[in-house]
Image: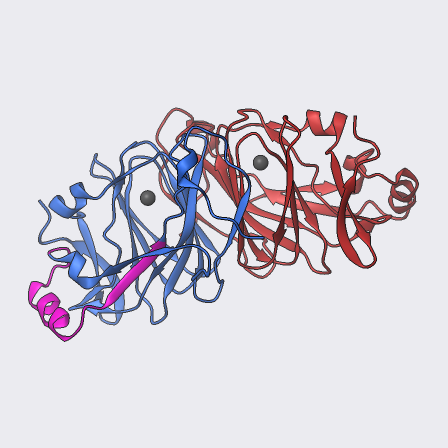
Chain colours: A red, B blue
Amino acid sequence: MTTQANNGNAGHPLAPFSHYFSLNNGLSDTAPSLKRYLSKMAGMYADDAAFRERLQREDTLVYEFHELGVPEAAGNLAFGTSIVYPGKIGDEYFMTKGHFHTILDTSEVYYCIGGKGLMLMENPEGEWDVREFSPGTAVYVPGRYAHRSINTGHEPLITFYVFRADAGHDYGTIETKGFRKIVVEQDGRPAAIDNPKWK
Amino acid sequence: MTTQANNGNAGHPLAPFSHYFSLNNGLSDTAPSLKRYLSKMAGMYADDAAFRERLQREDTLVYEFHELGVPEAAGNLAFGTSIVYPGKIGDEYFMTKGHFHTILDTSEVYYCIGGKGLMLMENPEGEWDVREFSPGTAVYVPGRYAHRSINTGHEPLITFYVFRADAGHDYGTIETKGFRKIVVEQDGRPAAIDNPKWK
Ligand SMILES: [Mn+2]
Ligand SMILES: [Mn+2]
C-alpha cells in the first residue's frame, strides 16, 4: 500500500500515496531520511572547545528527518518525521540547525509523538518564543519565524511536521547570525539565554 | 504554555501557539471539537432502513474533529485531530461526510496515531483511490481529491491532519452526488464497492 512521491511530476497532479513512520522511533522503512552529523554543525554551538572535543571522539548523529520529494507547488504539502537525538555540547542541548522558510510567510506544524524538548522561534523583527514539546503537543510555527527543535530530554525527540511544499529553506541566515537565544542546561533544567555568538 | 489561535487577527501575523491532542484518544483539553452525530448524515449511508433504525435507537456520535480558527491565509496551516468512532450502518462502516477543498488544488496530510481504517479519495476526473490507515501511516491526499475517513476497526480511528488554512470546504458536492465507492464489510473484511446512490 506504500508508494513513493515522484519528484519528476512537478506541474502534474500527484496521485495519493502513503508512508509509514514509526510512532515509537520516528523511523520509516519506505521514506529516505537525511542525517545531520555533528561535523555539519561547526560554529553553531556556543562552546567551541566542547564541540571540538566531542567531534574528536565521534562524529555523532545529532538528528535526522525525511525528505519525500513532493513537488514544490503551493497546493502541495511536504511532511515527515524529525528525530533529534539526546545529548549536549557543553551545556547546550542537541538541536537542529534551524532555518527560515524562503517564502517567509509560510508556516509549519509540528506534532510531538515522543520525547521532550522545545521549539525555539524568532522572526526578523526580533520577536522570539519557545514552546514545549512533549508527546501529544502540536506546535504552530507561524510564517516569518525561523525554527529550531531542541531535545532537552533523555530520549529521541520525535515530531511529525507538515509545511507548504514550495516554502523553501533558508539555512544561511541562521548559520551566519545564529538565533538570538540558545537553550542550555542550568541547575538541571533548560533555560533560554542570550546567544553569545549572535551577530 | 498553551494559547489559542485568535480568529480575530486575519491579515496580521500570528504568534506561535500550541495545543495538546492526546495520542491515546485524540482529544484535547484546550482545542474545541466539532461533533458530527448520525442525524447530520441523513442520506449519506447506502442502507436507509438501517440508518433510520439506528437513529431511532440513538443519535450516535459518529466522529469529531478540531477547528482552531487559524486565519484563512495561504501561508497559514489548519490542523488538529479527527476521531471516527467504530460502528456500522448496515454493512457500511462509520465514516466522515467527506469533502472537496474549495481551492481544489490544495492537498492535506493525515497521520494515523490510533485505530484502523481507510482514506477514500476521488477526483472530479473520476479517478479514485483508497489508502489504509494504521498507527504510524501518513496518507497524502493530493489536490483535487475529495476525501473521507472510514473506521474499519473496533477502536476509534485517530488521525492528525494538516491543510492550507485557506483551502475551504465544499461538503455540498459529496452530499448531493456521494462518492463513487462506498466501503462495506464483506466476509468480515472491508471492501470498496460501487455506491448504489451515486449520481
Ligand atoms: Mn521549516
Ligand atoms: Mn480536507
> Can residue A103 be seen?
yes
> Can residue B161 be seen?
no
Name the residue furthest front: B8
**How many discs mark residues in the rendered view?**
0
Q: Quadrant of the C terminus of chain A?
A: top right
The reply to whether the magenta stretch includes residue B54 is: yes
At which x and y percent is residue B117? 34, 60
- In this rendered view, identify the residue nearer to me: A191 or B21: A191
- In this rendered view, identify the residue nearer to me: A79 or B43: B43
Above or below, B154 against A187 in this view is below
Name the residue furthest left: B49
- In this rendered view, identify the residue nearer to me: B187 or A56: A56
Numbered range of the magenta stretch: B43-65
For the point 14% across and 71% down, the residue is: B54
- Horizontally, residue A36 falls left or right of residue B19, namely right
In which quarter of the view is residue A123 placed? top right
At which x and y percent is residue A54? 88, 46
- In this rendered view, identify the residue nearer to me: A162 or B185: A162
For the point 85% across and 47% down, the residue is: A58
- Horizontally, residue A119 falls left or right of residue B59, namely right
Above or below, A173 against B78 in this view is above
At which x and y percent is residue B41? 17, 57
Above or below, A110 against B8 in this view is below
The reply to whether the magenta stretch includes residue A130 is: no
In which quarter of the view is residue A104 placed? top right
- Horizontally, residue A157 falls left or right of residue A113, namely right
At which x and y percent is residue B3? 52, 49
For the point 38% across and 55% down, the residue is: B32
For the point 12% across and 44% down, the residue is: B177
In which quarter of the view is residue A169 placed? top right
